[in-house]
Amino acid sequence: MQQKVLTVIRKKDAAPVESPAQVSIEEESFDQGDALLAEIEAFLRAIREGTEPLVTGEDGLRALETAMHITRLVQGTG
């Protein structure tokens, strides 16, 4: 089973240039899940409750456009 871990490294208050940077490290573990299933469930819940979905159609369109743009850049056609 894969485990998803998010590591956040933050620079603490400014240290003198000659000393190593002081950082804080935070790690958060996440259970393996089905992101698409969670998104569909959230969408259906929004319909039932009459609220705005967490991921709107506009969000999806922007994500698709971004992915297509990145693909074109990687392929050298954008």
Image (tube, helix red, strand yellow):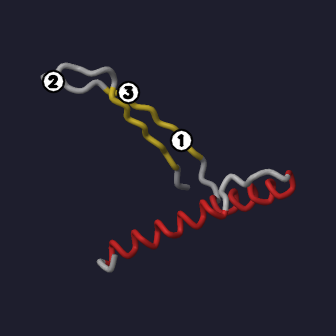
Residue at image mark 2: 17
**Side (left or right) of 7 relative to 62:** left
Disc 1 or disc 3, which is closer to the eye? Answer: 3
Q: CA distance from mark 3 to mark 2?
A: 18 Å
Q: CA distance from mark 1 to mark 3?
A: 17 Å
Which is nearer the N-term, disc 3 or disc 2?
A: 2
Crowdedness near tag 2: few (<14), some (14–19) or many (≥20) residues, C-alpha within 10 Å? few
The reply to whether dot 2 and dot 1 touch (C-beta < 8 Å) is: no
Residue at image mark 1: 29
Depth order, front residue of 78/7: 78
Disc 2 or disc 1, which is closer to the eye? Answer: 2
Kind of residue at disc 3? Ser
Residue 12's place in the image compared with 59, above or below, is above
Which is nearer the N-term, disc 1 or disc 3?
A: 3
Question: Which residue is located at x 60 percent, y 60 percent?
Answer: 59
Crowdedness near tag 3: few (<14), some (14–19) or many (≥20) residues, C-alpha within 10 Å? few
Location of residue 23 (image quadrant): top left
The reply to whether dot 3 and dot 2 touch (C-beta < 8 Å) is: no
Kind of residue at disc 2? Val
**Side (left or right) of 2 relative to 8:** right
